[in-house]
Amino acid sequence: MPFVPVYVPVGVPTFHMESAHDRFEASKALLQELDARFVCPDDILLGADKVAAFLSAQKPDLVVFQNVTFANAAYMSEVLHLCDCPIALWTLREPVIDGGRLRLNSLTGAYSAANAMRAFGIDRFPYIFGMPEESSVREQLKSAIRAAELKTALLSLRLAAIGHTPQGFGFGRALDTELLRSFGVTLECIEARELIDRAKAYSDADCKAYDEKTDAATAGLSVTPERNRLDHARLYRAYTEYVREHNIGALASRCWPDFFTAFGTPVCTVLSLLNDDGIAAACEADIYGALSMWLGMQLSHAPVFFGDPVSLDETENTVTYWHCGAAACSLARKDTGATVGVHPNRKIGPAMDFGCEAFPEATVFRIGREPDGSFRFFLFEGEALDKPKQFIGTSIVVRSEHPCRPIIEGSVEAGFEPHFVVMQGHHASTLAALADMLGMQVCRY
């Protein structure tokens, strides 16, 4: 279904209507410039009954509620009664302060609206203060619109858990009902051995195209022993066909020890290629890691890096993220390409072995699960630096906008999980807005 954002401008006719109509037209123009899909009324809704009549013909995925003038809580109550979607509350500045008439009184109306939302159990929501001409207002609205679009898209996401997390990695597990209730995401589960058995059933000829695709995407695949190279192609086909048959948008796959002991070839490079194919693919069966990757890919329109924080350098103000070798090939530095090596512990390939390219804006993100079943978003912004491979495997070095040591100390003390996503672009505001819409805590460092 298409995404439907709706503008709900409210007021009462006893205020200065010339000022009110000027702000209404400017606000409507901005919203429709930001997203042409916005449904807007022809005029300010001057009564709770007008709000109800307007919304009765809509099924919004986002409501931008604006007190053009003061309006009491009954206006917001109609929205809360009729709409099951995120609400962004937008307050206008008082246009003139000259000792004369209070022309809009939008801010008092916002207090009434927010108080009604609190009474309905909504204690987190995007809040925008300012005039349509202000750049901060434009950016906050863009974040709220994109976040609501993401929240709607989550309802269509099918996420696969392939195998179970290894011992001691329980932070990556998720219940299907928990994912559905909290994010609207459908989870399906399959044992890793089912895909291993499927891969074993293919002949070498069946998988020739997958071998050729891997060779074209990587550098140095020829150093991989032929048996491992052919078995990788089998596994790549098994995963690709499973994803296609089940309409999977993201997956969290078990990797060690099964793919070394039961199959003889790692799954690392398969996950790398799936990420380049547009499927968010996390290793170590980290389901919330895969969901974090999917959100990052939707925002950046590119593959994201998934890995552990393994090193910090206070002099450079950097954190290094690393993992065994499943980063998307397209993230590799241009001077090396997506080099193929071996898994750093098991010494079996193919696994990716490169440093990631630089990009001037980066966001580090993680959906964290608290012991009580609630969720929180870890966020910080910075830049990915031009650095070579730091360790065997794949790595990316991120310089934070703020001192890096408190980020590490604070997130360790807060008990965050050890897997994080690094995405291209600055998207913390949008992810914070999404957290608000989902009723989740934001931990921004």
Image: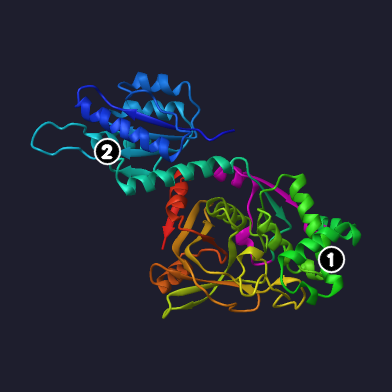
SS assignment at label 2: loop
From this view, report whether residue 397 is shown above or below residue 84: below
Quadrant housing the C terminus: bottom left
Magenta stretch in the rendered image: 167-193
Residue 65: where, in percent of width, then height?
Answer: 36, 34
Observer-nearest residue: 256 or 36? 36
Quadrant housing the N terminus: top right
Marker count (numbered): 2
- Looking at numbered disc 2 in the image, what kind of residue is underneath it? Leu
Say if mark 2 contacts mark 1, CB within 8 Å: no
Residue 177: where, in percent of width, then height?
Answer: 63, 44
Specify whether residue 263 is in view.
no
Residue 274 vs residue 417: left or right?
right
Residue 79: where, in percent of width, then height?
Answer: 41, 28
Q: Which mark is residue 92?
A: 2
Label 2 vs label 1: CA separation? 62 Å
Residue 119 vs residue 170: left or right?
left
Q: Residues within 10 Å of mark 1 (few under 14, many from 20)?
A: many
Specify whether residue 341 is in view.
yes
Residue at the outermost left position: 99
Q: Which residue is mark 1?
A: 231
